[in-house]
């Protein structure tokens, strides 16, 4: 056996020569006009409103969104992801994300021309507003390394005196803005919620101090957040620095805000911008690289990279439905755990951005006690201390007790935690974090399965489940026993516990029970005419059901799949019949079709998603902004190039026939393999695999098996085994650090490189984009 050369982990020589600035410039957002906000609520999800057409920026904790408020007035929204209500017990009023407020720039004259560009390579927005009294040329960004916002201008004429102001928003759950009646104990006897903010000024620094209360008597302040800003003038130049600080007391919050402002102004504008840019430039070089023959999809893909890095970082809270761009205009001011959180974090592992997903795994570990309290806080379940779950919504601490009484309205979502742990497991497997898998994930997964032990039923020697839930299936009564959502979650969890125990020789005391539960678990309810049912009771008749909760055995778990000939008819019937009616429905269906090798149909789903649901700045709305669906689309775009479910890594499986050329580098697969590949004229011409941890690498290459050759980077032959010759499957034994290249002996190998795009196809997003015309 000849082994490949070793290189430093994460080093990616295939992307070293990419001109990232030039490549990403194609995907910047442009505006040659800005869309104003509607005067009232935008619950109609209109394609163009200011919020969904603004320049979004952030550093993982602070965020801004620059857009037009009305004629001659521009709005710079301010968000900080850990500003939440602090009341107990948890609900969408007591523990909600809070809107903070926004700055306004009001021009002196009437605007007759406006333009703006968001550079995602630099994470900076530049623009100019031209009025009948002069111009305002601006540059703005959220500093990548420090928690402040920069807004710099250079003016001409009377616009030197444009007006800069801050408008605080009421510190109250946005859920109230949608006409819901607040709980009786949410306000005090005077009908007041949190006190009004206090406006202060110390020298040139302005402050807005917002106290938050922890009870209805207002006798105890639990937390305070402070918006602070200072302006510095130099002739026709103005430099504004703003921050949001938060702490347990007013004194500490004010001190933190002063410190940020003082430090920001102690550094030159040029130096601050250089540090900011260097951070973002390094970020893109850490990432996997993908280029698509479809310019719009490629632009969308890289904008999601930018967006997620703007709203996530290792020391910040997990990403909820709003990220760092909160809105008063939303009913979703929390974390939703029955789809949204899972989809948001479904793609970072494969993109080799695991450091941005770690806050979620850390939060699950840190709040394991609350996950167990979600069971034991329910009357009658106090002794179920070995079990864990999570309800539909929560704050960042995951405390959201789940009552069986919710089964009466199809909301007893027992499987949410198990589904979330599926992505945790993917992370551990793909990064080879075996210690974390054994010490952190394994106990959590055991606890999630233990809840099923407590609630399971038994009849005729088979284990079943009582009425639980099938998320978002439109019934307001019990869904009936044996919901496929829970059966798929449970079966995957049992398989994973048993496999993990075997691989690491754990010999867990419950191993025999897990095997018995799996062996005697009832089959998935199905119907020959309609495919998989929702439960024993409900045949899948509502074909517009938007959640694919009843199809989890197909995706994301692949417990039944296209490669098993006995499953094909049922898989095809179920997927064909399901016609989801939301954006994430289309991304999920596309992923199912890709597992079946149906690339053209999957691409049709994605193009419909892009046309119907993606906003000008790639945000997404369902009666308010929600973050997860564009992230789910990224996961599906990965699947066009790399799938790693089951027992193999599939490269370019089910590629659309229109996609003759394609390339990617550094996608991370299960087993801690980093995979790169290129395709030209419809043929795979190179696959490169780096093994970080060593082990068996099983690849489905789609290169004719007799033509496959495997070599080191220096050209030495590497032995391999041909397995499924009709499917191009090979096996290679690899050691840590090995790198091999798989090629077709009849095709000239070409390294992955950016695909060219005609100049009239770029600038796909932003109000001034090609896409909007």
Image: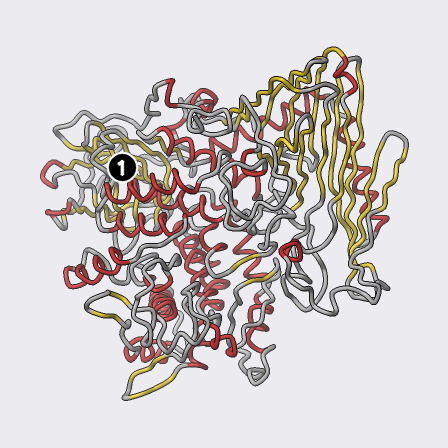
**Quadrant the N terminus occupies:** top left
In this rendering, would 340 be left or right of 708?
Answer: right
- Residue depicted at 43% across the width and 71% down the height: 469
The residue positioned farthest toward the bottom in the image shown: 460
On the image, the x and y values in percent for residue 226 come to: 78, 44
In this view of the protein, which residue sits in the foreground, 590 or 494? Answer: 590
Query: Vertically, is 509 above or below 459?
Result: above
In this rendering, would 79 be left or right of 596?
Answer: right
In this rendering, would 585 be left or right of 40?
Answer: left
On the image, the x and y values in percent for residue 740 come to: 27, 37
Q: Which residue is mark 1?
A: 740
In this view of the protein, which residue sits in the foreground, 462 or 45? Answer: 45
The quadrant holding residue 554 is bottom left
The quadrant holding residue 771 is top left
In this view of the protein, which residue sits in the foreground, 160 or 665? Answer: 160
On the image, the x and y values in percent for residue 514 come to: 36, 76
- Residue depicted at 20% across the width and 37% down the height: 710
On the image, the x and y values in percent for residue 434 come to: 43, 57
**Quadrant the C terminus occupies:** top left
């Amino acid at each position: 056996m000849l082994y490949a050369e070793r290189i430093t982990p994460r080093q990616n020589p295939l992307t070293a020569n990419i001109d990232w600035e030039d490549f990403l410039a194609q995907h910047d957002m442009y505006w040659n006009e800005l869309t104003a906000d509607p005067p009232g609520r935008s619950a109609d999800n209109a394609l163009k409103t200011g919020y969904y057409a603004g320049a979004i920026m952030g550093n993982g904790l602070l965020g801004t969104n620059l857009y037009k408020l009305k004629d001659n007035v521009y709005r710079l929204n301010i968000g900080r992801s850990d500003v939440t209500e602090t009341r107990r017990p948890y609900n969408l009023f007591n523990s909600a994300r809070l809107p903070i407020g926004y700055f306004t720039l009001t021009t002196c004259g009437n605007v007759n021309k406006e333009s703006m560009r968001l550079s995602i390579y630099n994470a900076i927005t530049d623009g100019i507003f031209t009025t009948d009294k002069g111009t305002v040329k601006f540059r703005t960004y959220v500093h990548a390394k420090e928690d402040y916002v920069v807004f710099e201008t250079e003016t001409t004429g009377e616009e030197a005196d444009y007006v800069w102001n801050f408008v605080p928003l009421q510190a109250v759950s946005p859920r109230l803005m949608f006409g819901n009646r607040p709980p009786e104990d949410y306000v005090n006897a005077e009908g007041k919620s949190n006190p009004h903010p206090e406006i202060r000024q110390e020298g040139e620094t302005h402050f807005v101090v917002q106290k938050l209360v922890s009870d209805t008597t207002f006798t105890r302040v639990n937390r305070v957040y402070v918006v602070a800003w200072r302006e510095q003038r130099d002739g026709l130049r103005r430099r504004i620095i703003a921050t949001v600080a938060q702490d347990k007391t007013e004194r500490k919050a004010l001190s933190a805000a002063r410190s940020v402002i003082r430090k920001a102004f102690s550094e030159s504008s040029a130096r601050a911008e250089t540090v900011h840019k260097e951070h973002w430039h390094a970020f893109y070089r850490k990432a996997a690289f993908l280029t698509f023959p479809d310019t719009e999809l490629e632009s969308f893909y890289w904008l999601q990279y930018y967006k997620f890095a703007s709203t996530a970082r290792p020391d910040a809270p997990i990403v909820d439905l709003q990220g760092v761009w909160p809105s008063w205009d939303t009913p979703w001011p929390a974390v939703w755990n029955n789809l949204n959180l899972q989809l948001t974090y479904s793609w970072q592992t494969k993109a080799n951005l695991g450091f941005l997903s770690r806050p979620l795994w850390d939060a699950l570990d840190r709040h394991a006690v609350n996950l167990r309290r979600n069971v034991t806080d329910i009357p009658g379940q106090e002794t179920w201390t070995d079990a864990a779950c999570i309800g539909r919504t929560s704050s960042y601490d995951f405390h959201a007790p789940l009552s069986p009484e919710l089964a009466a309205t199809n909301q007893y979502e027992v499987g949410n935690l198990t589904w979330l742990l599926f992505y945790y497991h993917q992370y551990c497997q793909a990064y080879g974090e075996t210690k974390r898998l054994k010490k952190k994930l394994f106990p959590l997964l055991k606890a999630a399965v233990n809840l099923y032990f407590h609630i399971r039923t038994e009849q005729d020697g088979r284990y079943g489940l009582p009425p639980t839930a099938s998320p978002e299936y439109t019934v307001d009564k019990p869904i009936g026993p044996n919901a496929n959502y829970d059966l798929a979650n449970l079966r995957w969890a049992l398989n994973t516990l048993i496999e993990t125990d075997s691989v690491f020789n754990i010999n867990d005391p419950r191993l025999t029970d897990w095997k018995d539960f799996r062996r005697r678990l009832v089959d998935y309810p199905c119907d020959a005419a309609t495919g998989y049912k929702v439960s024993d009771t409900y045949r899948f008749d509502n074909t517009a059901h938007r959640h694919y909760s009843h199809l989890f055995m197909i995706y994301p778990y692949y417990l039944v799949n296209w490669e098993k000939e006995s499953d094909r008819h049922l898989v095809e019937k179920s997927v064909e019949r399901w016609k989801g009616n939301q954006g994430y429905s289309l991304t999920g269906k596309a992923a199912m079709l890709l597992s079946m090798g149906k690339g053209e149909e999957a691409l049709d789903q994605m193009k419909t998603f892009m046309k119907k649901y993606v906003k000008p700045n790639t945000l997404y709305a369902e009666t308010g902004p929600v973050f997860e669906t564009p992230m789910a689309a990224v996961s599906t775009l990965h699947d066009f190039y790399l799938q790693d479910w089951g027992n193999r890594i599939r490269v370019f499986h089910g590629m659309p026939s229109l996609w003759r050329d394609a390339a990617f580098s550094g996608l991370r697969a299960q087993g801690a393999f980093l995979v790169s590949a290129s395709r030209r004229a419809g043929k795979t011409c190179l696959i490169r695999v780096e093994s970080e941890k060593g082990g068996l690498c099983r690849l489905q290459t789609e290169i004719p098996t007799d033509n496959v050759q495997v070599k080191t980077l220096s050209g030495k032959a590497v032995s391999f085994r041909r397995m499924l010759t009709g499917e191009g499957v090979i096996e290679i034994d690899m050691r840590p650090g090995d790198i091999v290249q798989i090629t077709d002996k009849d095709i000239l190998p070409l390294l992955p490189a950016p695909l060219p795009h005609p100049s009239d196809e770029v600038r796909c997003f932003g109000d001034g984009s090609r896409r909007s015309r």
